[in-house]
Amino acid sequence: MIVRIRFQPSALLLLLLTFGLGGSSVAAANRVIAIQAREEIPEGLLLDVGIEVFDPGLPPDDERVSPSKGVFSELRKSEARYMAYHLKNTLEATGQWGAVRVLPRGVGTTDVRVYAEIRKSTGYKLELQARIVDATGRRWKRRKYKEVAYARAYNENAVSAGDPYQHLYNRIANDMLAARDNLSDSDIAKIRTVTRLQFAADLAPTVYSDYLKTNRKGRVKVRRLPADDDPMMQRVSLIRERDFMFVDLLNEHYAGFYTRMGTSYDEWRKFSYDEEMALHGQRQESSKLKWIGALLVIGGIFLGDGDTQVERAAKEAAIYGGVMTISSGIEKGRESQIHVEALKELASSFDAEVAPMLVEVEGQALRLEGSAETQYAEWRRLLIEIFNSETGLSVDPDDSDAVVESLAAEEG
């Protein structure tokens, strides 16, 4: 027995509308306000924060990732500096911290250190993997932060809309504050002490390396403290001030880079947002048209041979219309590739606009494109030489007791 299925026009129309008119909503950004300090925090309880230049999230074996995946190596490297400095501005604005500085990756000593890797960054969405630890090795937070762009920030008529991902930075700031508020005053004092001794151990490891002990879990504890009137620690403090001055000069360069990059980057993100939304729309429309086309073809086939010329014509029209709709969907898919190429072109032009700059520090030209870590390491080496020259360690660096006695005699 042959069962002939006939689609009623109303049923077919309902089915097509179900597949053809369904839309997707764009998630709104989760609005978060950074918590501000309500009163001045005593200096002894302020913790300094070092924000490492973000990891751009590029594969080590092939940094030139395919632009079709939305990753452009030169842009990512620029974003790594830009985002780190933007987080610095966010933390400073809260009034909850001591000095907040951007640091080259892998160098420097500070009370609290922020590490972050860029997992995804477009004008539409940002994903960061962040880790916050203090000088004692205590882990404050490890979390993936995701945010859909606050679309109003791309509106030229919006007043003080700010960064499209400001709420993500605010969440990081609030998470850091929550972790700090769980510490006692004694914990904060220990963190500051460990940071000071770590700097001293970097300068004079033969003298201060045994003042701290690190256990198998990576936690650092103070084994003993130098005397309050230790002349060598006084010299360490002076050298540390010089280091702060150098890092502050480094941050002036980051600030200039941040400001110079801002306008171009804002435009790029706006274009990227528009392109990604258009790309999303094209892909969705392409998918819809293919579904509708397939349904029309299936519907035409199920109409059967038809008893009248009108039914046969309806069948042929449904099949032909379905094929044409599928073709249109494929063409829409091709158009989406045009948007991907537009993103690539925008990133390439942006790379040229944010070319690296040179800054003069202590009479030397410092290039901050891929060499800040090396330059800072060289600066720390010079500090050690200055310290050795001032303290006499270069004469007999292994005889720490004799050096301390000599310094005490000088001070006397």
Image (cartoon, rainbow, N blue to C red):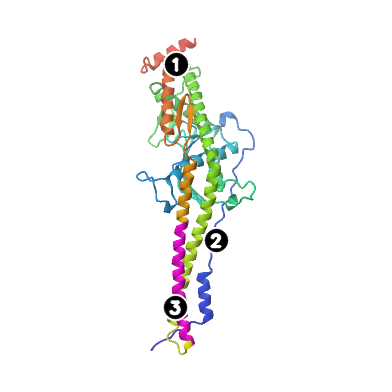
Residue at x 59%, y 49% (from the top left corner) = 153
Q: Secondary structure at mark 3?
A: helix
Query: Which numbered circle lies on residue 21?
Result: none
Q: Amino acid at mark 3?
A: Ile
Residue pointed to by mark 3: 319
Q: Secondary structure at mark 2?
A: loop
Q: Amino acid at mark 2?
A: Ser
**x and y percentages locating residue 271 in the rendered image:** 53, 52
Q: How many marks?
A: 3
Q: Is residue 34 visible?
A: yes
Q: Secondary structure at mark 1?
A: helix
- Per the model, the C-alpha gap separating discs 1 and 3 is 90 Å
Sequence order check: which comes first, mark 2 or mark 3? Answer: 2
Which of the two residues, 407 or 90, is positioned nearer the viewer here?
Answer: 90
Q: Mark 2 packing: few (<14 Cα in 10 Å), some, or many (20+)?
A: few
Residue at x 46%, y 68% (from the top left corner) = 328
Secondary structure that dominates the magenta span: helix
Residue pointed to by mark 2: 25
Q: Mark 3 packing: few (<14 Cα in 10 Å), some, or many (20+)?
A: many
Horizontal side of residue 299 vs 31, given as left or right = left
Q: Image quarter for residue 55?
A: top left
Which of the two residues, 245 or 202, is positioned nearer the viewer here?
Answer: 245
| Position above or below: 48 against 318 | above
**x and y percentages locating residue 76 in the rendered image:** 45, 44
- Per the model, the C-alpha gap separating discs 1 and 2 is 66 Å
Horizontal side of residue 86 vs 3, given as left or right = right
Q: Amino acid at mark 1?
A: Glu
**x and y percentages locating residue 133 in the rendered image:** 47, 38
Residue pointed to by mark 1: 390
Q: Is residue 142 visible?
A: no
